[in-house]
Image (cartoon, rainbow, N blue to C red):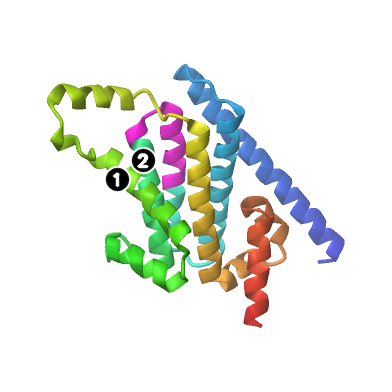
Amino acid sequence: MGKIMIEDTIKAEISYLKSEVESLIGALKSIASQKNRIINSGDENFFAYIAKHIIFFKNLYLYSEKRYQYKVMISDLYFYMLSLITNEVRYVYVNERSIIENYTRILMNTTTKENHVTEKMFVQMKEKYNISEDDYSLIKCEYKTSCGYIHGGNILEQNLVFVFKKCLNIDKGIEKRNLYYERVIKVIKIYDKLLISNSFNQIDGVFYRRKSILKYLLGSKNLEYLFSKLNRDT
């Protein structure tokens, strides 16, 4: 296949992927309208970011190892967006926690059946990938927050009426959504870089001659990082 033909094929695929992302956002807006929720540009940008990661993991699953963790991650990301649309905060954090755990399992090459994600696994991941203190603190802080919403935090220390009112406030939705989105994106970006560091040959193979598509899905910085890892390996 000639260079021009390859470039045209890639442009066509990117155009198709963009339409897929737009269609998904349209479907999410339709669900939101049924729930009397308004989707703003901040929501749309975040959902597009998550949608691109769904496509990324779909590529890894279809064109490389058919790892169960990739399928679970795709499911988590879909339900994560849905819980944000339906404004069910507890399920937002259930899915966020699962995303963090499955990203960690992918990096540590373990499964749900083999091992639960524990403090020990986080420490092992930090040591294996030489994660900076700032990045590690951000991951652990977001994970702790999600666990707190799921398990109730200090819920046993409070009286019944206090806890009941707290549950009512939770149902009102996530406060300061844009700041929340920024935190989650930072966490995902950390994990993306770790995944590239761990699986750069695999990712290179999946997106062979399709680096423009990888750039569209994960951004130019991650593509540059992939090239830096490949160049060091040669």
- To which residue does mark 1 refer? 147
Q: Is residue 223 left or right of residue 51?
A: right
Residue in the picture at 41% in, 50% down: 99
Residue 55, given in percent of the width and then of the height, sits at 57, 50
- To which residue does mark 2 refer? 93
- Front-most of 49 and 176? 176
Residue type highlighted by circle 2: Tyr
- Front-most of 27 and 196? 196
Tell me how far mark 1 sits from mark 2, CA to CA.
7 Å
Q: Main secondary structure of the magenta part?
A: helix
Q: Quadrant of residue 202?
A: bottom right
Residue in the picture at 61% in, 34% down: 23
* Mark 1, other Cα within 10 Å: few <14 / some 14–19 / many ≥20: some
Residue in the picture at 53% in, 58% down: 192
Residue at the far front in the pictured view: 133
- First in residue order: circle 1 vs circle 2: 2
- The reply to whether residue 16 is in sight is yes
* Above or below, comparing residue 193 to residue 34 in the picture: below
Q: Are marks 1 and 2 in contact (CB under 8 Å)?
A: yes
**Magenta includes 86?**
yes
**Magenta includes 103?**
no
What SS does tag 1 mark? Answer: helix
Residue 182, given in percent of the width and then of the height, sits at 53, 42
Residue at the far bottom in the pictured view: 234
Residue type highlighted by circle 1: Cys
- The reply to whether residue 109 is in sight is no
Residue in the picture at 40% in, 45% down: 96
What SS does tag 2 mark? Answer: helix
Q: Is residue 195 left or right of residue 3?
A: left
What's drawn in magenta, residue-wise?
A: 76-90
- Quadrant that contains the N terminus: bottom right
